[in-house]
Image (cartoon, rainbow, N blue to C red):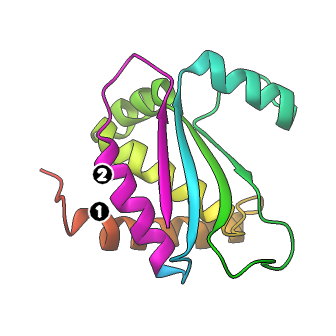
Amino acid sequence: MGVTILNQQESSKIKHSILRKVAKCVLERFGEERASLSVVLVDDETISYYNETYLSHEGPTDVISFPQREGEVLSPKEELLGDVMISVERAKAQAEEYGHSLEEEVILLLIHGILHLLGWDDKDPEERSEMEKEQERLLRECYQQRYPFP
C-alpha cells in the first residue's frame, strides 16, 4: 500500500505523516491493504480549476476525488485507487466555522475523499447520512484514538 502526499499550496503546514497514517488505516478497514492513492493539497484557485473543468461546478470546493478504479479489480498487485484533492484554504475556513482545528478538517476531508474512491456516494440525503456516519466512525478509529483532540 502506498500513500503519496503532494503539497501544492503554501498557506498552511500540514503533517504528511498523519495524513498517510489515516489514509492507510481507512484502506485497511475496507480490506484495501494493497491499494494506493495520492493526496494532493492545493489552494482554492487550483481546486476551482479542477472543479470547473472536470465537474462543471463553478468556484472552489473542499475536496474532489478522482477515482482510477473501473469495474472489477484487474490485477492482484497493488492497485491505484485514485487521487484525493483537498483545498487547504477551504479546509481552514471550514475549520474556523465548525470550531475545530485545520488538521481535523483536513483529516475529515481526506476520509470523505477516500470513501468516494471506494464507491461511497452522498448525492441524496440518505446516502449522505450514511456516509457522514461512516466518516465519523473512521475518524474515531483512525485518528482520534491515536491523536486525541484537545
Under mark 2, the amino acid is Ile
Q: Residues within 10 Å of mark 1 (few under 14, many from 20)?
A: many
Of marks 2 and 1, the one in the foreground: 2
> Considering only order in the chain, which callout, 1 or 2, is on the residue closer to the N terminus?
2
Q: Where 118 sits versus 30, above or below?
A: above
Residue that appears at 37% across and 61% down: 22
Q: Quadrant of residue 72?
A: bottom right
Q: Is residue 61 visible?
A: yes
**Position of residue 92 in the picture relative to residue 55 (left or right):** left
Q: Residues within 10 Å of mark 2 (few under 14, many from 20)?
A: some
Image x and y of residue 37, in percent: 58, 56
Residue that appears at 53% across and 64% down: 132
**Position of residue 81 in the picture relative to residue 93 (left or right):** right
Q: Where 149 sits versus 127, above or below?
A: above
Query: Answer yes or no: do the residues labelled 2 and 1 have beta carbons within 8 Å?
Result: yes
Image x and y of residue 60, in percent: 65, 25
Q: Which residue is mark 1?
A: 143
**Position of residue 67 in the picture relative to residue 21 (left or right):** right
Under mark 1, the amino acid is Tyr
**Position of residue 114 in the picture relative to residue 88 (left or right):** right
Q: CA distance from mark 2 to mark 1?
A: 8 Å
Q: Which residue is mark 2?
A: 18
The foreground one among 122 and 138 is 138
Q: Secondary structure at mark 2?
A: helix
Image x and y of residue 146, in percent: 19, 65
The foreground one among 92 and 64 is 64
Q: Which mark is residue 47?
A: none
Image x and y of residue 89, in percent: 47, 23
Q: Where 36 sits versus 88, above or below?
A: below
Residue that appears at 43% across and 26% down: 93
Residue interval drawn in magenta = 1-28
